[in-house]
Image: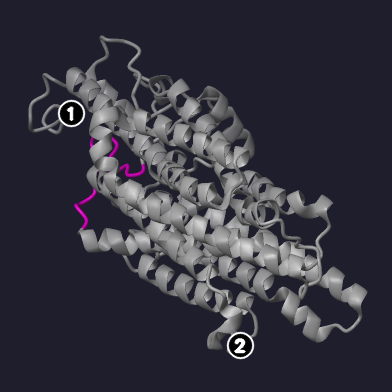
Amino acid sequence: MGGNSGQPSIHTYTSLAEDGPFGFVEAPKRPTGRLIMHSMAMFGREFCYAVEAAYVTPVLLSVGLPRRLYSVVWLLSPILGFLLQPVVGSASDHCHAMWGRRRPYILTLAVMMLLGMALYLNGDTVVSALIADPRRRLIWAITITMIGVVLFDFAADFIDGPIKAYLFDVCSHQDKERGLHYHALFTGFGGALGYLLGAIDWAHLKLGRVLGTEFQVMFFFSALVLTLCFIIHLCSIPEAPLRDVTKDIPPQQAPQNPPLSSDRMYEYGSIEKVKNDSVNPELLILGEKSQNPAEQTQRTVTLKSLLRALVSMPSHYRCLCISHLIGWTAFLSNMLFFTDFMGQIVYHGDPYSAHNSTEFLIYERGVEVGCWGLCINSMFSSLYSYFQKALVSYVGLKGLYFMGYLLFGLGTGFISLFPNVYSALALCASFGVMSSTLYTVPFNLIAEYHREEQEEQVRRYTSVLGDIPAGGFGRKV
């Protein structure tokens, strides 16, 4: 995102498509079918997320994970993401694979999700079949399950960034908005289907008896859905590979006295800051052309530059990042513990009791009912995302954002005050409002900010170059 090349430390941010006279090119209009195919990744991801939210807590407790390590499992993935995401994101920006910049990373993360699910849903069964000693079996079951949870959670969290970047790279502003709404719609559908399958008592059905346990049944469906959805997603919209400018254009020597230094002309964001109103427009363009293309392509992101960028970014971006962080923290804390809350607090079950005891069976029943509540959340998320376009004309994007947070806060508050089965299930609709809000509104706000910056950039060029003939600078240079 930002970088420096021996010049004063100024962060330079550019648009995703940078090959036009004003620094960007509008992508062609994409058919609806292609946007739906692109959204299938969110369907598969959310389906697997639903399985994790419904089953990971019961799985961790059933394998005997100590209570003191319970929260550590959920803490490891965000720490890894914070440390690695800037590095991998920068590598993705500069990826020269023939398949494109984003799709190789999306494929890798999808494989990691599949491996993580295999470990945490099947680890206990495999370890029990291979190790006879109870103590060693317990240690290995806990270790493999924890590794699977961390690997899946890291990949599932991480993959959202490349998917959104893939959409923004290949779509126009209008298609970005349409694509984000399809993402939210299919996110709700995927979650609803995942929670619905989790709410079924597979132990008394033939498929459950054939595959062994309900965990194996869920892995079978999760692996099938994830594989099919990501195959469709990766074949949805062609992605042009990143051209290596350093191979095509030799490094050019900068003029001894350049008319206008690019480091002085540009600050944070894609809006150009013209310091002097009397700048000659011809010299302005020549100053840009004199930049070394090799230097333009070598902008890498490190953890230090990311933290520096977070401090120096415009206030509206910083407020959006902070509120998004708070929203996801609250939402995930609720979702990951909701089925366990239903099993222990609402139904008064005990996940640590023997697996054939009444207390454990009551706990499992609470988990199944919790899955129905999360299914309601996903269905309402899809429904709410469908009506967002109508609502945004009345309350605006920021109004939608505030409304999502408000309804979520009220819903979770009433559930904690009145831990009743029916009230909890009814208030799960507020989770759906928050889910749809988090998956669409912040990205729509970013797209809107970016569009405004591009329009401002065009206006500045037009005001500076207003007297230049339509034929361009070729006649005058």
Q: Is 253 drawn above or below residue 425 in the view shown? A: above
Q: Quadrant of residue 458?
A: top left
Amino acid type of disc 1?
Val
* In front of the other: 288 or 49: 49
Residue 222 vs 272, above or below: the answer is: below
Indicate the position of residue 359 as horizontal and vertical percent values: 75, 65
Of badges 2 and 1, nearer the viewer stands 2
Q: Residue at point 46% right, 39% down?
A: 295
Task: Count neighbours of disc 2 (C-alpha within 10 A) and say few if under 14, some if 14 to 19, many if 20 or more.
Answer: few
Please tell me whether residue 19 belongs to the stretch shown in magenta.
yes
Locate residue 403 relative to residue 340 in the image: left or right: left
Tag on residue 377? none
In the rendered picture of this protein, how many numbered marks are placed on residues?
A: 2
Q: Secondary structure at mark 1?
A: loop
Residue shown at 74% from the left, 49% from the top: 71
Q: Which residues are magenta?
A: 16-30
Q: Which residue is mark 2?
A: 209
Q: Is residue 287 left or right of residue 402?
A: left
Dot 2 falls on a residue whose secondary structure is helix
Picture quadrant of residue 147:
bottom right
- Can you identify the residue that label 1 sits on? 477
Residue type indicated by callout 2: Arg
Q: Is residue 337 above or below residue 38?
A: above
